């Protein structure tokens, strides 16, 4: 990840050189996760095309199988937007100098991310054991929060082993791996193993692991119709999901490698903001800045809050009321409710 941050900084002149301009063709990336399955459905169903046509643009939605790689590619300027968590947005594009806006606050994980061990035990059972996870991702953050709750730290472990989300299920099946931290649908698959035991999950830290669609700030500013089309399409699908449309939910379930019951179980541990007004309220809450300060402190402690970051305040984060945390002269992450509010007002 440190190498990644160096690369993103090198890509700065390409991604944030003031070259953003009006255009009609856009590309966004997403990866498999319960709360992001609507992006695949939007592409396959034609709903994204319908909303893009309404605004005279074209939006291509591309699935990337490796989550971190999808953010890497966005940061390098290959995509105009990407599905990402609040933490990974702060550390990778924003920490690397790419001004990024949270266009859609889709949900927060309420049990979808979990620390899992083989056999019986509790968090203390992790002492001296290596733990497999996507290093420096939200899984790493969840592990740190869990260890802290048990009076432990990463130093008490037998180390962490960086493992791609694409390889996590296979890794847990091997004799060498004793503990993993990952997210759904991988969590559900791993917990099917009779030896798997969940020790801690994101419902223990509600509202801290937030799932977003983030976009390049300059691109959005130059092309507001891009934001309108994306948000309009998203909330059309949210309406279908909230109504329990089984055809829609089944399509998402199958695309994520499970069945309808399995996908509904994953949704049960996801605090989805089906109503845009709920997303606006969450994004405008007093709790969000506190969460982002905690996330920034974690990233700084791990040495990944931007190359050469002198403190946890290195990257400025702006909120809907105009307030900031971090360095107000280096705002590179923005929570903007403009387009979600338009959806709530029926103005799209």
Image (spheres, grey):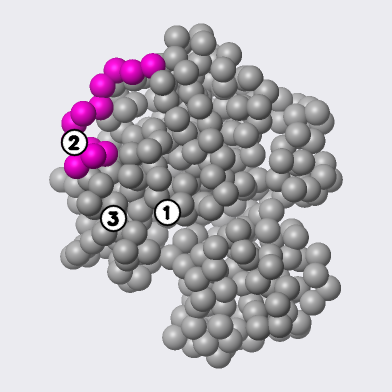
* Mark 2, secondary structure of its residue: loop
Q: Secondary structure at mark 1?
A: helix
| Callout 1–callout 2 Cβ contact below 8 Å | no
Q: CA distance from mark 1 to mark 2?
A: 22 Å
List the residue tagged with mark 3: 7
Q: Can the viewer see residue 11 in this picture? A: yes
> Which x, y percent locates residue 92?
35, 53
Residue at horizontal 28%, vertical 43%?
A: 98
Residue 9 location, x and y as percent? Answer: 24, 52
Q: Residues within 10 Å of mark 3 (few under 14, many from 20)?
A: some
Mark pair 3, 2: CA separation? 16 Å
Q: Where's residue 327, x and y in %?
A: 20, 51
Q: Earlier in the sequence, mark 3 or mark 1?
A: 3
Q: Which residues are magenta?
A: 13-24
- Dominant SS in magenta: loop
Q: Residue tagged by mark 2? A: 17
Of callouts 1 and 2, the N-terminal one: 2
| Residue labelled with disc 1 | 88
Q: Which mark is residue 238?
A: none
């Amino acid at each position: 990840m440190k190498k990644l941050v160096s690369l993103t900084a090198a890509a700065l002149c390409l991604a944030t050189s003031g070259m953003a301009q009006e255009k009609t063709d856009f590309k966004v990336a997403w990866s498999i996760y319960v709360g992001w399955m609507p992006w695949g459905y939007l592409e396959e169903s034609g709903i994204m095309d319908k909303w893009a046509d309404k605004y005279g643009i074209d939006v291509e939605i591309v699935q990337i199988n490796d989550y971190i790689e999808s953010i890497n590619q966005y940061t390098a300027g290959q995509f105009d937007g990407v599905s990402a968590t609040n933490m990974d947005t702060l550390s990778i594009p924003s920490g690397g100098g790419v001004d990024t806006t949270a266009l859609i606050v889709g949900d927060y994980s309420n049990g979808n991310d979990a620390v899992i061990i083989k056999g019986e035990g509790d968090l203390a059972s992790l002492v001296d054991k290596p733990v497999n996870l996507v290093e420096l991702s939200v899984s790493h953050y969840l592990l740190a929060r869990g260890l802290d709750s048990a009076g432990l730290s990463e130093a008490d472990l037998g180390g962490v082993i960086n493992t791609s989300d694409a390889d996590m299920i296979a890794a847990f099946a091997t004799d060498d791996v004793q503990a993993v931290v990952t997210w759904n649908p991988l969590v559900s698959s791993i917990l099917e193993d009779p030896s798997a035991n969940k020790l801690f999950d994101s419902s223990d830290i509600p509202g801290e692991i937030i799932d977003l669609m983030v976009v390049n700030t300059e691109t959005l500013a130059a092309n507001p119709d891009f934001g309108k089309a994306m948000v309009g399409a998203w909330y059309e699908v949210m309406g279908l999901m909230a109504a329990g449309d089984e055809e829609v939910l089944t399509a998402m379930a199958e695309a994520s490698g499970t069945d309808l019951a399995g996908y509904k179980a994953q949704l049960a541990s996801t605090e989805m903001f089906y109503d845009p007004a709920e997303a606006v309220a969450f994004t405008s809450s007093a709790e969000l800045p506190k969460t982002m300060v905690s996330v920034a402190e974690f990233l700084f402690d791990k040495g990944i809050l931007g190359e050469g970051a002198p403190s946890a305040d290195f990257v400025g984060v702006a909120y809907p009321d105009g307030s900031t945390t971090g360095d107000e002269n280096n705002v590179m992450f923005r929570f903007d409710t403009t387009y979600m509010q338009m959806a709530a007002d029926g103005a799209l």
